[in-house]
Amino acid sequence: MSFMKNLKATAAVVALSTGVAQAADVEVLHWWTSGGEAAALNVLKGDLEGQGIGWQDMPVAGGGGEQAMTVLRARVTAGNAPTAVQMLGFDIQDWAKEGALANLNDLAAAEGWDDVVPEALQGFAKHDGKWISAPVNVHSTNWVWANKAVLDTNGIAVPETWDDFAAAVDALSAAGITPIAHGGQAWQDATVFDAVVMSTGGPDFYKAAFIDLDEEALGSDTMKEAFDRMAFIRANVDDNFSGRDWNLATAMVINGDAGFQMMGDWAKGEFLNAGKVPGQDFLCFRFPGTQNQVTFNADQFAMFDQGGAVSAEQSALAQAILSPTFQSAFNVVKGSVPARTDVSDADFDDCGKQGMKDLAAAASSGNLFGSMAHGHAAPASIKNAVYDVVTAHFNGEYDSATAVTELVDAVSIAK
Ligand code: GAL
């Protein structure tokens, strides 16, 4: 028996003999609390249980993970870090800089992660040459989800351009249907903004504004146009959008109460969880005008240093997460695509297959960019500054020209 298997077997014995939470469990802090997310998480729990490793659940509701990150800070400050934490992009690097994360290099070398994890993800999963987190998936934010029957009944084809999209929205509005399902929470406003900025200005503009944080791009007429488009979107959501959770907005599309939702592909998990079939009940397509680009965010599990070498449970969790069979099984349910380049698309539905193709094409053509809304374009301080301005504008606190000025100021202060 290998050293690793030995450790796992020991963990199993300890878990079986006491039946309560103890050292051989993994405590996992995450924000996967919607129906689709929970279904995906069960794939991971089941995998670990099969290895005799217990799961102590630490869910902190709130899409995008802001609340989860607040809870994490409190836990670490109290000297009680969870074993593993769902985390996005720059947050991982921030914790690594604080020296809080365990070194997974031995496992990464044994499993050959350097060869199979996409480079864009390695940029966040490694710090100072050390692997400090295990990538679970690749999501992307520039998707639209549509109710097929609603579109068909109203003679609406999949929109290719912003103008097509605006015409489709107007047609639904004229027919008395809520065109856009949206939840008014800062991270959701910002998720839509990712796609709108990409569509309005194209990839060079997105990069200049959100990754290079170039003042000229942030303060440009193109950015003003992006805010104008956000105002159009705001004008076409229902009256109860404020504060609504993202999965409830997805449910509006699922139930035919709205035509479209602009949301990352975790939305697909909700459709699947409701028994809906892509191409029959719902449609997935890239936000009009971003067909060749991908704005990505990858969920990873960062392993917190428990005082010494990486623990056997942390290794087992990380190893399970990166295994090719798990990558397929989990991402099929979650709506995301694998965090490895060598996983077959055979078990994925059409949206998943497209997602995998889009990701590979965008990576090789230089059209893959980190999502600002989900912590992969800039660190949290800047992301939060962008959130504030986008949300204030969305809620009508100021017009597009003012939003542009506010954005330049907010980013420059946060830098
Ligand atoms: C994202 C996360 C996704 C999904 C979403 C909504 O930040 O990457 O996995 O969970 O939030 O909760």
Image (spheres, rainbow, N blue to C red):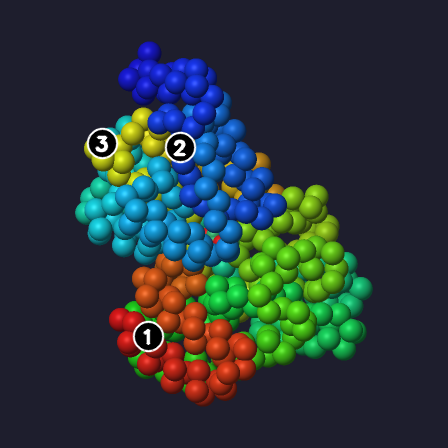
Using the rendered view, name the quadrant where residue 149 is placed.
bottom right
Mark 3 or mark 1, which has the lower sequence index? 3
* Residue 68 screen position, x and y as percent: 43, 52
Inspect the image, locate mark 1, and give the three-letter code of the amino acid beneath it: Val
Classify 55 as above or below 153. above
Marks 2 and 3, the one that precedes in the sequence: 2
What's the residue type where badge 3 is placed?
Ala
Residue 193 position (above or below residue 43): below
Report the front residue among 231 and 117.
231
Image quadrant in which you'd find residue 217: bottom left
Label 1 sits on residue: 411
Query: Crowding at label 3, few (<14), some or many (≥20) Cα neighbours within 10 Å?
Result: few
Q: Is residue 44 left or right of residue 220?
A: right
Which of discs 3 and 1 lies nearer the camera? The answer is 3
For the residues marked 3 and 1, what is the alpha-carbon distance in whole angstroms?
38 Å
- Asked whether residue 153 is in view, the answer is yes
| Residue at image coords 40%, 71% | 386
| Helix, strand or loop status at disc 3 | loop
Residue tagged 3: 309
Q: Which residue is tagged 2?
A: 26
Give how far across and how far down residue 293 sits, in percent: 46, 61
In the rendering, which numbered label is found on residue 144?
Answer: none
Spot occupied by residue 85 in the image (x, y as percentages of width and height)? 38, 44
